[in-house]
Image (cartoon, rainbow, N blue to C red):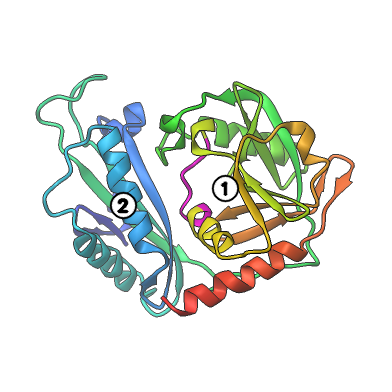
Amino acid sequence: MINFNGTLLSEADSKLIVNNRGYKYGDALFETLKVVNGKIFFWEDHYFRLMSSMRILRMDIPMNFTMEFLESEILKTLEANDLLNASARVRLNVDRGEGGKYAPSKEAQVHYNISAEPHNLPFYNIDDSRSYIVDLYKDYFVAPGLLSGLKSNNKAIQVIGSIYAKENDFDNCLVLNTNKSVIEALNGNLFLVKGDTIKTPPLEDGCLKGVMRKQILELLAKDVNVTVEEASISPFELQKADELFVTNVIKGIVPITKYRKKTYGSDFAQSLIAKLNAKLRLL
């Protein structure tokens, strides 16, 4: 069942209108949520990121779009799909409805839809037996700036980059901005470990303002044994690193095991994911 503006519909009945602005112009935002037994992981961070992104896109935020209202709609959708007492992946999509060309018409109003599917891992873990090989994606580049960091429906680079990765037997690719700095992976933020220094690209470089990125930075800030830098990463630094890992809300932390001829360990990532799961138990 799909939740369309509060109405539960079957997938067969949940067709988008062809004039929907999210479909026509990518005039839409989304949040990917991990929910376990009715608990939305990091819901407050997701909600405020969505509200901030809607303001940046100058959407008229409906008065009923409170954190409590949207949470209740998510839980209603999970219950309709028999996932309220299970682990689930949820997509909350917000668009500007129908009307207008590039400029929205006065009739255009914000709509939302929510879909849910089962997800088999309630907590985060790292599978040491699995390789995770990446390469640089260099066919297209991301413009630096905060607009590139929005979780919008315009994901052309992620789509064609994923096709490139699949065609070349890579598990993921790292994305560059127009300054040729490495900013993120196709599906998450990037962290680099070198000795006791942990680096991640700054938001100004064009990387996603990731919810899991925020959690990891908060955990690292409490570790007196490491130095954390939000600084640009050059491709040359990748092969000098001790560890590289990708973060997102669904998978948590995914260590990269190989980039070109360089192989990496995962000791730091393992210790970090233990802290992340401990934090979740306190939520």
Q: Secondary structure at mark 2?
A: helix
Query: Marks 2 and 1, Cα distance to the nearest angstrom?
Result: 19 Å
Say whether residue 115 is left or right of residue 200.
left
Say whether residue 94 is left or right of residue 188.
left
Tell me if mark 1 has few (under 14), some (14-19) or many (20+) residues whose alpha carbon lies within 10 angstroms of its own. many
The three-letter amino acid code for the residue at tag 1 is: Gly
Number of disc labels: 2
Q: Secondary structure at mark 1?
A: loop
Residue 252 is situated, as x and y percent measured from the top left of the image, at 58, 61
Q: Is residue 16 visible?
A: no
**Up/down of 253 relative to 27, above or below:** below
Residue 36 is situated, as x and y percent measured from the top left of the image, at 44, 74
| Residue 48's disc number | 2
Tell me which corner region of the image, top left, top right, bottom left or bottom right, holds residue 123.
Answer: bottom right
The three-letter amino acid code for the residue at tag 2 is: Phe
Please report the residue visible at 68 percent of the width from the left and 63 percent of the height from the top. 225
| Residue 188's disc number | 1
